[in-house]
Structure formats: C-alpha cells, structure tokens
C-alpha cells in the first residue's frame, strides 16, 4: 500500500513541474486567490483512494438549509490508504511548496483534522455560500488555506458538485472549479472568501480529500474572528438568507463569549478514543 511519504513524493513532483504556472494562477488579480492542479497523482493511485472511500452511511451526515453532505475525520475507522492520503498533504515538503505558490508564511497543517478529512456528496447534496471558520479549534491560529483533492473518476462539470468562488460576495456571480478527477484546488480562506458547492445532479458521489492550513497571522494581517458563516444564493428565498445571517451572528457571538467551554466542533480526529 502507498504510504503518506510516497504519496507526498508524487504531490511534490507534480507541483514542482508546474510551479510557475500555478503560482501565476494563484496570484492573479482576484478577490479570492486560487488555482487548480490537474493530474496530481498517478491515476491508478487516485482511483485506489476513491475505491476505498467508505459508504456514506458510515460517515457523518450534515444536513440543513445550509448544507447537505457526508463528512469524516476519524480516519482510523476506514481503509488506511485514506489516512495516508490525507496526511500526505501535511508533509513538510508539500507545505513548503504551497507556501512558495501562495506567498504565505508560517503555514501549519492541521494534524487534528479540524473540519478536514474526507467528504462525499451524492445526488441532491450542496453547500451554500459560506466563509469557513476563521480559526483553529483553540482559536490560536488563523485558517488561511483550503486544499481540496477530488478523486471521483469520470466526474463531469455538468454533474454538479463544483466548487464555486464568489469573488464579489454572495450576491454576485460565482467562478467555478469543476471537481475533476485527480485534481487539487488551493484557495485562500479569509473574511471575504465566500465559496460554495453547487447541487449534485448525478447519481454518483463526488468524493474529496480535504486539508486546511493555519497560520499565527491572518492573510491580510488584520485581526478578525467569525464562526462558519452561511448565506443564501441569489434567487433563493429572502427568508432563508435572514435565518442564516441571524444564525451566523448568534454562533459567532457565543464563541467570542464562551470560547470552547460550552461547545466544540466534534469534527476532529480523536486519537485517544
């Protein structure tokens, strides 16, 4: 079985071969810096990762007006290749290359997989426009980058399940990254990085390996804090947007006042369970 170091070897090799192009793409003049790398791993390895994804009923369903998807962070509950794939993106060589691409310093991968790990989205699944939580579990570091690796063979853009970046905010028009097999998206996450996943319209599953990098300083060096914050999409009922905005404000205020004394996100890798 491929281990995390051998998988990281492939990631490093691919990033090095296209470093100038993806650096230029990431640093293009956009509100949400981002880029997509195709053909990241050997396709047979990428297919093995996909084949080892657990059935959705062995993952955690998150379903509300804000989102509809299955997620998992307890990696020792699944085939070992999934854990190896997740942590390959935390190899110091990969982190260093991502730092070179993005120009961000002090990057630290998340060994606890706070909101990271794996996800699966079947027909009807979606993720409304949102800002990711601004900090790590202990509110010690800013969340600054998302690394999203897509592994479903044959996935086409018209199947849905595409990442959408709302450069002008959630009332604008989005820019789309298709969830193409064996591709990696790197995107900045900050207080303006609204993004979503459009509804899956296909009978298959859009599967993703997710990692998030943190830093002691925010991307724009300003001080801010917010819980994961959702908005409705243009064309949705105004009432849904009002509910989401009220929920955002209440959760952010509660976290500011209480920290993790009352509630903590259960989506972490619990190695001592």
Image (spheres, rainbow, N blue to C red):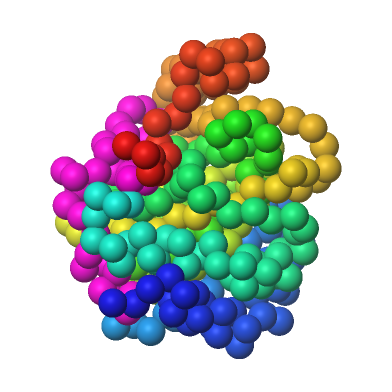
Number of labels in the image equals: 0
Q: Which of 146 and 36 lies nearest the eye of the viewer? A: 146
Give the percent coordinates (x, y) of residue 208: 37, 58
List x then y, in percent, for residue 28.
73, 66
Q: Quadrant of the N terminus?
A: bottom left
Task: Find out whether residue 50 is within the magenta segment.
Answer: yes
Give the residue furthest to the bottom: 17
Q: Is residue 184 above or below residue 210?
A: below
> Which of the image's four quarters has the C terminus?
top left
Residue bounds of the magenta highlight:
45-74
x%, y% of residue 259? Answer: 60, 19
Locate residue 171: give its quadrant. top right
Residue at 76 percent of width and 48 percent of height: 219
* Location of residue 135 with respect to 103 vertically, above or below: above
From the viewer's perspective, is 97 left or right of 247?
A: right
**Magenta stretch encompasses residue 81:** no
Task: Determine if residue 273 is in view.
Answer: yes
Tell which residue pokes out farthest to the right in this image.
Answer: 221
Q: Residue at x 46, y 47 (%)?
A: 113
Q: Give the residue displayed 34% in from the left and 82% down from the top.
A: 43
Residue name at image x 38 percent, y 84 percent? 42
């Amino acid at each position: 079985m491929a281990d995390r170091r051998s998988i990281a070897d492939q990631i490093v090799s691919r990033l090095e071969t296209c470093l100038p192009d993806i650096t230029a793409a990431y640093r293009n003049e956009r509100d949400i810096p981002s880029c997509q790398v195709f053909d990241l791993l050997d396709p047979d390895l990428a297919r093995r990762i996909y084949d080892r994804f657990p059935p959705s009923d062995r993952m955690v369903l998150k379903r509300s007006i804000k989102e509809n998807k299955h997620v998992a962070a307890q990696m020792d509950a699944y085939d070992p290749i999934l854990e190896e794939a997740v942590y390959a993106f935390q190899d110091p060589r990969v982190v260093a290359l991502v730092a070179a691409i993005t120009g961000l310093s002090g990057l630290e991968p998340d060994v606890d997989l706070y909101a990271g790990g794996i996800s699966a989205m079947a027909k009807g699944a979606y993720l409304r426009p949102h800002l990711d939580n601004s900090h790590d579990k202990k509110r010690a570091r800013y969340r600054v980058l998302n690394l999203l690796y897509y592994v479903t063979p044959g996935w086409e853009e018209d199947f849905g399940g595409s990442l959408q970046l709302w450069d002008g905010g959630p009332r604008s028009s989005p820019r789309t990254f298709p969830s193409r097999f064996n591709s990696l998206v790197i995107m900045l996450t900050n207080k303006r990085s609204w993004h979503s996943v459009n509804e899956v319209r296909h009978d298959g599953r859009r599967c993703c390996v997710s990692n998030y990098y943190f830093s002691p300083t925010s991307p724009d060096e300003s001080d801010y804090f917010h819980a994961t914050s959702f908005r409705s999409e243009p064309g949705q009922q105004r009432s849904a947007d009002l509910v989401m905005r009220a929920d955002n404000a209440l959760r952010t205020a509660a976290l500011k006042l209480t920290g993790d004394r009352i509630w903590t996100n259960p989506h972490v890798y619990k190695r001592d369970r």
